[in-house]
Image (cartoon, coloured by chain):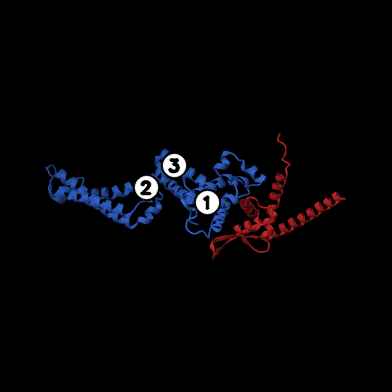
Amino acid sequence: MSMPDLSLDNWMTQLRKGLLELAILNTITAAPLYGYDIVRRLSDVDHLVITEGTVYPILSRLKNSGLVETYIEESQEGPARKYYRLTTRGRDELRRMNQHWDSLHQAIGGLRKEGKR
Amino acid sequence: MIEMTPAAREQFENYLQRLRNELRGSRSVVADEVEQNVREHIDIALAHAQGPVGATEVIGVLDRLGPPERWLADEDQATTSRGFMDRFVSGPGDWLAYVSFAIFLLAAFFPAIGFFLLIPAMAVSRATVELAQDRGEPLGGRRWLVYPAIAVVLALTAALLILAPPLRIIAALGLDSGGVAEIFGVPENTPGHSRAVLGAGAMVFGSWWIIAAAFCAALLRPIRFVFAPLLEKLRRKHFVVMALFGALIAGGGATLIYFR
């Protein structure tokens, strides 16, 4: 039986995987974005995206789940781009995910405070 | 799609192949969609490059995208570790070629309905070719599954075009029986009769081949499209050669009749 990898790297990888969906959905909350733009914005967040390509399967999964939808728009700067936007269901789901994240963040913060006492 | 050097194109195609291998079979991720996203990513990332993009630039972007083998979340990978059949039926680009070959084999084993089966086999083969072209991927080993149906339909069509009309004309004019005697005034069982029959036949075949060559030259693009990719190198000059050959045969036939 193999021992679970409890290294910091592995923990961060698992955390990152779990958070990417939330990060992607939040990225397109304000306005629709095309895939490359989403990748660029997420890459600017430290330690969130190590391999940029990871974003695309997640976008596909979010679309299959009905949380986001796509449309094609011509671009003056190059090829036509596929834009991603939240669906109504996606917006509701994101609100719940953000609430859950906030409460989790608070709870972890509380635990850390208790630990410092 | 941006222009790439052959080396860059090869790197990119290899990467896409790895992507397809990795993502196909995942129930939550659509491999074709991800592939399209990656193509768009490359196009945008290298849009400002001057001239054909080299392998170094493409590899730089692909390195940042990372190995596709590390893209999927654990739960996706669980569904990706699939059996042979899952991999086999992962996308039309794969199984259409097998369907085409299966119909082709049915046509070969059941000659009575073979002709009718060749048409769908040919259609599915062409669909496979188009799909591969749309995705910018080479047919690779699938050509052995796809080409037989197209090649057989092409051979049958060519044979029909080249042989059937002149044979019908020869039969209609009775050139294979007593027609030559009436038309050219050469009684049967005379020394010149067999040469006149041969000459008349050659004239009919040669003349028809000139007409057929002109007809095919006029319809060159539709012909190339229907039998793609086998006739991609077909040019009008090939039909000029066919017409010249027809003229040579017809001329030979006329000479035979003249000197019968």
Residue with the mark numbered 3: B144
Where's residue A69, x and y in %? 63, 58
Q: Nearer the viewer, mark 1 or mark 3?
A: 1
Q: Are marks 2 and 3 on the same chain?
A: yes
CA gap, disc 1 to disc 3? 34 Å
Kindly indicate which chain is depicted in blue in the rendered structure: B
Residue projecting furthest to the front: B56
CA gap, disc 2 to disc 1? 43 Å
Residue with the mark numbered 1: B56
| Number of residues whose C-alpha sits closer than 10 Å to that of mark 2, classed few (under 14), some (14–19) or many (20 or more) | some
Q: Are marks 1 and 3 on the same chain?
A: yes
Secondary structure of the residue carrying tag 1 is helix
Secondary structure of the residue carrying tag 2 is helix
Q: Which numbered disc flags the more N-terminal residue, 2 or 1?
A: 1
Residue type at tag 2:
Leu
Residue at x 62%, y 41% (from the top left corner): B81
Q: Chain A colour?
A: red
Residue with the mark numbered 2: B154
